[in-house]
Amino acid sequence: MKRVFVWAPAIFVLAAAASCVALSPREGDGLADSLRINQIQVMGTHNSYKLEIPPPIMKLIADRNADSALTLDYWHRSLAEQLDAGARQVELDPLDDPEGGAFADPLGPRMLAQQGVTVEGPDRAAMLKSGIKVLHASDIDYRSSCPTFVDCLSQVKAWSDKHRDHTPILIMINPKHTPISWAGATPVRPFDKDAFNRLEAEILSVFSPARIVTPDDVRGTHATLRDGVLAGGWPTLGEARGKVMFVIDDAPARWAAYADGHPSLQGRVAFVNAHTTPDAPEAAILVSNEPVTDFALIQQRVAQGFIIRTRADADTREARSGDTTRRDKAFASGAQYVTTDYIWPDERFGTGYTAKLPGDAAARCNPVSAPEPC
């Protein structure tokens, strides 16, 4: 007999976001327009598009690797709800699909169909379109609140259009290069220069250059982007309100294709993750996801002028245990963007764990780099 599974996401508790007071504060977030954008601290979300994995597919994963299943057992509300709750960083995982249809028939549902089990697949109409897709793991974790890259960006822009005074939103881009390691997995095209050019073209199809903080804005008249950063070249909050920034979060060997032909990212829309190459001419934004072990390093780099993204929690561990050590270190490190899977607590775990700035602020003066008084 065929079995059909239907499920609903767990119910979360919404916590209101409050504001922080700064010198000559702007009504709304309470931060002074004279602050530079590397002198504030905000919250963000990790894999922001990710929806719940169907239970039968979660069982397939757990039967192969129980630990992996635990790390994937989280999901998010819509991008607009996250931004409404104070998130000012979202994370997207693009997969290159120039012809369309590459990810329309994932392995997980096919495996279950052989057992007589039906689960909801991806948004097939969206998957058949040509263009970049946004999925966590194409064959097993394919449910996305915005299946195409353009759709994700359009949702952020729609929210931004309604909140033109918002602090700048950092959009993390984690390009996917390889398939999952299961036999029969859907092939994934590595991101090469052409793919990065397509990705940038899709960005510019949604956001005009005037709505983006770019490497050229920070470099100014300096020889390199890094020189501009160290000289205090980040725009003021007043100049950056209502804008977005992009960073390619990938290893240097992979983002090199994006930087190729664009010395110090001249003319490019996005920054790159220079965590392992802080002396490179492209260094401006560093992704340092271990705030406990890298605490002193993050503080040092924030003080130098870099923008850092770190994570308050990972792999559902803190939510299950209620341990706030990592979260508290992330805030104290001065990392400007602190990412969580738990703007709202997951009631299944009973710990009440959530990651919010002190006082439930949506943004605050940076504890390491903000000037006094702030």
Image: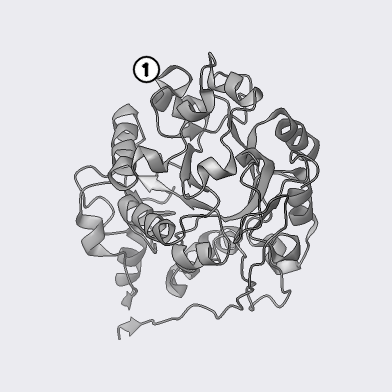
Residue 116: give x, y in percent of width and height.
31, 77
Horizontal side of 364 relative to 27 (left or right) equals right
> Which amino acid, by three-letter code, is at mark 1?
Gly
Q: Is residue 204 visible?
A: yes
- Residue at the image position 49 percent from the left and 33 percent from the top: 271
Residue at horizontal 56 percent and vertical 35 percent from the top: 235
Q: Secondary structure at mark 1?
A: loop
Report x, y in % for residue 326: 76, 53
Determine which residue is flagged by label 1.
261
Taking 97 as reference, is 171 left or right?
right
Quarter placement of the N terminus: bottom left
- Residue 114 visible, this orientation: no
* Residue 266 left/right relative to 329: left
Q: Residue at x 31, y 41 (%)?
A: 204
Residue situated in front as seen by the camera: 214 or 139: 214
| Neighbour tally class for label 1: few under 14, some 14-19, many 20 plus, Cα within 10 Å | few
Q: x%, y% of residue 60?
A: 46, 66
274 shown above or below 323: above
* Looking at the image, residue 225 lies above or below residue 118: above
Residue 255 image-quadrant placement: top left
User: Which of the 4 image quarters holds residue 46?
Assistant: bottom right
Image spot of residue 334 (x, y percent): 74, 43
Residue at 78% in and 63% down: 323
